[in-house]
Amino acid sequence: MNREKILGPNDKAKVLENLGGPIQRDPGSAENDDRSLRPQRMSEMVGQREVFERLEIAVQAARQREEPLGHILFDGPPGLGKTTFATCIPHELGVPIAMTSGAALRAPKDLIPYLTNIQDRAILFIDEIHRIPANVEEYLYTAMEDFRIQLVHGDGLNARTINMAIKPFTLIGATTRAGMLTGPLRDRFQMREHLDFYSVEELTQIIKGNAKILQMEIDDESANEIAIRSRSTPRIANNRLRCVRDYVTARAEGKIDPDITRAALLKWEIDTLGLDKMDRKYLETLIGVFHGGPAGVEAIAHTINTASDTLIDEVEPFLLRTAMVVRTPRGRVATQKAFDHMGMSGKPVDIDDESAEDDQDTLFT
Ligand code: ADP
């Protein structure tokens, strides 16, 4: 029979024995490819001013009241700064951060060590939070709301359910698919922030700053050229900058100018709008194979032998935003702009007849 009790400090130590060591890290040690170019403080971040100001107020209030910051959900396409905000916030608060991903949390037992080891007012960051299964999500509810979790101690007839208090903490979730989150989980986030694409000016500023960090000298026109071809996304701008750096190191004795920048980007098959091979393959298939659509994303993915998730998360957001593709109830449709850019003959389908679909994956716009 399961019995419930509130856990005392000694019981808690016993239960924790088998749960593995702490996973908290100093916020500065976030490990990933972007590490050296990732801003450490929110004030170093470019753009997203509205989001920045709201977060600054919330952080300052939490510090003054000596309370944990409310839970925060970031949504938006990949590479726009969700992880960067999440890793800057603990620096602002002076607390540690523990990081995991929705795909790694297959059962509540995967989440328990994070929650039991969390320090007072620390941050737990769950990337791709839309990928957590329903039982993990339900487990999060009481942790987020009451800072309590239930642990099962022992087996069979001796099993006891123990109700354990955890330290007040802040959950920061990031998702590229806000539409896939359930209402109850979404409602438990006090702040929900949608990150939008960046302007060319903002990207130019990021590129110039990062060129300094990479010890490159770059002129304004070259930085602007990279920005124009970075699909409005800082992570892509960083990648393009690194490509140009490699090219000038290997082929141009380290000297950057606008012509060399264009030659470098051409070598990496980045076109004048910043579309890469995969983006063009998508448009070529939609126009060439499906006659401009409407075509389902699964059918397009199947034809180009790619996961539909990759197309939805990484390829389509920019094409939709720049109106080269429109989503309709019957599928994706290429617009005249896409036909023109690809230099392909044919006539796009009349979009009015197809009535454009609401963007169901974007909750907050
Ligand atoms: P996401 O988590 O949304 O996929 P990241 O936060 O990992 O995106 O951002 C990728 C990279 O882009 C970062 O390492 C950083 O170099 C850069 N970046 C993102 N947002 C900004 C910003 N607002 N200002 C400056 N650089 C940024």
Image (spheres, rainbow, N blue to C red):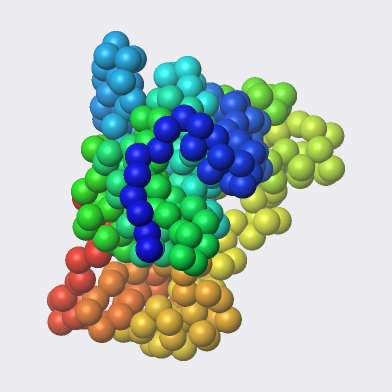
Q: Nearer the viewer, residue 118 or 206?
A: 118
The x, y position of residue 250, in whole percent, is: 84, 43
* Number of marks in picture: 0
Q: Quadrant of residue 144?
A: top left
Q: Is residue 350 left or right of residue 7?
A: left
Q: Quadrant of residue 249?
A: top right
Q: Is residue 104 left or right of residue 178?
A: right
Q: Nearer the viewer, residue 253 or 297?
A: 297
Q: What residue do we see at 56% from left, 76% from top?
A: 306
Q: Nearer the viewer, residue 92 or 286?
A: 92
Asked whether the viewer can see residue 279, the reply is: no
The x, y position of residue 230, in whole percent, is: 51, 47
Against 242, residue 50 (above or below) is: above
Q: Nearer the viewer, residue 7 or 137?
A: 7
Q: What residue do we see at 22% from left, 55% from top?
A: 184
Q: Image quadrant for the N terminus? A: bottom left
Q: What residue do we see at 27% from left, 60% from top?
A: 182
Q: Is residue 248 left or right of residue 358?
A: right
Against 263, residue 88 (above or below) is: above
The x, y position of residue 67, in whole percent, is: 31, 20
Q: Quadrant of residue 164?
A: top left
Asked whether the viewer can see residue 266, the reply is: yes
Furthest toward the top, the residue is 64
The x, y position of residue 77, in whole percent, is: 41, 53
Q: What residue do we see at 66% from left, 24% from top?
A: 213
